[in-house]
Image (cartoon, rainbow, N blue to C red):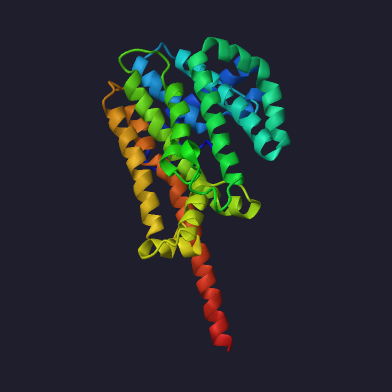
Amino acid sequence: MFGYIYVNEQELKLREYNTYRSFYCGLCQELHRRYGRRAQMVLNYDMTFLALLLTGLYEPETLFEEKRCLPHPVHKHAMARNDAIGYAADMCVLLAYQKGLDDWDDEHKVSGRTISALLKSGYERIREEYPRQAKAVEENIRLLREVEETWKGTSEDQENAFGKACPTDIDYVAGLTGNFLAELCVWKEDIWQEDLRQIGFYLGKFIYLLDAVEDIEKDRKHGNYNVFAAAIDADAKNGTSGDEAAGADTGDIWEEPRRGEIRKILNSMMAEASRAFERLPVIEYAPIIRNILYSGVWCKYSVMEEKVGRRKEKRAGAGGDYERSI
């Protein structure tokens, strides 16, 4: 689900990109230092963003070291180290442990069970040190699982009796990821906590929805829950008419008007997150953070759009070749 909150490299100055990489590499090194080499496999861009955000806000003393590492053994490169990066490393492990358990429960992925087993001792320590964050992740992932179980048990006579865990309620379902990412963004409960919660909440919703957009075809193929697929199917069963039916009939979220609606939802999520960031007194690293919020988060979406466009062109070309052959 994670890995969408990344920089747009083409829009960054070289110095800014090198700074960003120093935080990414520093987070990787911190995972190794705290939890062993195997923990480095749970490194992700989203927690790198968190480390940058909290460093820019709280300005902890930061050490930049030139080191070699296993993935880059030849040349030394910069690695940032501070308390905010240490906190981000803890949150990486917290998320990865719970996601591993969820993957095992949902799809019996051996990789999920393995990751959770490897991180269990570290997770127990984090759970004691950060009970608020751990509780938020545990509770909201449980609620996400409840939504999926409700969807799996759906029949035609149940579809209007979901209650709170409605699998077709995009705002509610995405909000569960927003809820726990909001708590992870709050390192210190102080005057900045509400703005940090807002950033985390809307980023969490954006991540969940973008992941659902990317995975919808795979989820349909394997019979897995996907909030957009569930909403489309519900529209079809309810006999949606007019413009909305065009997207519902094909089940294609890249067809209008559904494509525009989804883009509007994603835009609103990032607008709220960015608005909260601009209220924070962040000066150092602000250009990098703005790059991520205003541009970087859309890079993956743009790649998806390009893939869809190429696929449609290929189908259209194949149809033209067929027509010419007859």
34 over 92 or under it: above or below: above
Q: Position of residue 293 (x, y in %)?
A: 36, 36
Residue 4 visible? The answer is no
Query: Where, quadrant-wise, is the N terminus in this rendering?
Result: top right
- Quarter of image, res 295: top left
Q: Residue at x 54, y 86 (%)?
A: 324
Q: Residue at x 60, y 23 (%)?
A: 68
Front residue of this view, candidates 314 and 134: 134
181 over 267 or under it: above or below: above
Q: Position of residue 99 (x, y in %)?
A: 60, 31
189 over 320 or under it: above or below: above
Q: Position of residue 189 (x, y in %)?
A: 38, 13
Q: Position of residue 30 (x, y in %)?
A: 56, 18
234 on left or right of 15: right
Furthest-front residue in view? 157
187 on left or right of 142: left
16 over 127 or under it: above or below: below
